[in-house]
Image (tube, rainbow, N blue to C red):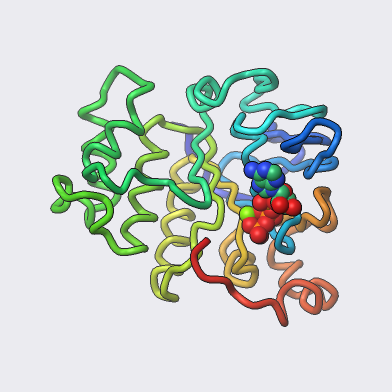
Amino acid sequence: MHSMATSPFSAATAPVLDVRQVVAGYVKGLPIVTGASLHVGAGEVVSILGPNGAGKSTLMKAIAGLVQCESGSIGLRGRSLMGLQADQIMQAGLGFVPQTGNVFTTLTIHENLRVGGHLLRHDLAQRLERAYAMFPALAPKRRDKARTLSGGQRQMLAVARALMTNPSVLMLDEPSAGLAPLMVEEVFERLHALAREGVSVLMVEQNAKAALRHSDRAYILVEGRNHLEGPSAQLLQDAAVGAAFLGTRQRRGPA
Ligand SMILES: Nc1ncnc2c1ncn2[C@@H]1O[C@H](COP(=O)(O)OP(=O)(O)OP(=O)(O)O)[C@@H](O)[C@H]1O
Ligand SMILES: [Mg+2]
């Protein structure tokens, strides 16, 4: 894994993930994502914010190869992902923690991790040990069913599972949804630590203020396309952003 001491993206650094003018949806000719562009640099934590129904989850599914792109381009470490199947995209180095159903509740913690890592045949034992070292709370529960975990532990398992393929970029759809405030902080701190270790992070969040406090840059998506973007600290202080996106919106429960 590569490591990077500083996060700010500079034009001199090629993005790890480069998404340009993506148009995608569930029915051909009726796009939900209508021209979205973003990039994630090495060691960065990047947020995607926006109102309900803006197409944030659909954009992530398009990047992960779960929804077909009608046009645009997606590159990962300089390689085009266009036309690849979801499992090939995972093998190319993209990890995805979806909004719902991100762990198998009827399987044990250990089985969940093994399933997450099955695409890479080598070093499975080593990758399992690394997962438990990274998320020590999971280790004593390795033989328990995932449904017995708390919401926060389940989210940790989902992240650990996605990391089993050694991704360069980890995408998470609403990682803090339904978690108690302390757990929210812990999840975001974990994501920061991952970025420092060289796994770039792209997350969709409803919890906009917390996401801006815990990311380097952010994109605000409205009606399927880029509305605003910039350094998170700057967006956090922007009065227009505050009024439209940070002030009055309610946090939702688990999806
Ligand atoms: N599987 C699907 N089939 C058809 N339409 C869908 C599907 N999933 C989502 N949509 C539609 O796509 C639009 C955008 O949904 P999406 O889930 O991408 O929004 P979002 O920005 O993630 O919203 P939220 O903040 O509520 O999670 C919505 O109008 C939704 O009804
Ligand atoms: Mg969503």
The N terminus sits in image quarter: top left
Placement of 246 over or under 164, stated as above or below: below
Coordinates of residue 77 in the picture (x, y in percent): 62, 26
7 over 64 or under it: above or below: below
Splitting the image into 4 quarters, where does residue 127 fall?
top left
The relative height of residue 26 versus residue 122 in the rendered view (above or below) is: below
Residue 93 position within the rendered picture, expressed as x and y whole percent measured from the top left: 51, 28
Nearest to the observer: residue 171 or residue 188: 171
User: 11 or 25, which is in the foreground?
Assistant: 25
Residue at x 83% of width, y 48% of height: 225
Q: Quadrant of residue 58?
A: top right
Identified at 24% across, 37% down, the residue is 111
Count every numbered label the image shows and give the total.
Answer: 0
x and y, in percent, of residue 28 in the image: 80, 30
Please tell me in which quadrant of the rendered image residue 237 appears: bottom right
Residue at the image position 53 percent from the left and 61 percent from the top = 255
User: Residue at (37%, 46%) from the top-left corner?
Assistant: 103
User: Is 136 placed left or right of 103 in the picture?
Assistant: left
Q: Position of residue 181 (x, y in %)?
A: 44, 76
Residue 58 in view, yes or no: no
Looking at this rendering, what residue extends furthest in the front direction?
27
In the image, is 136 to the left or to the right of 7? left
Residue 7: tell me if it is visible: yes
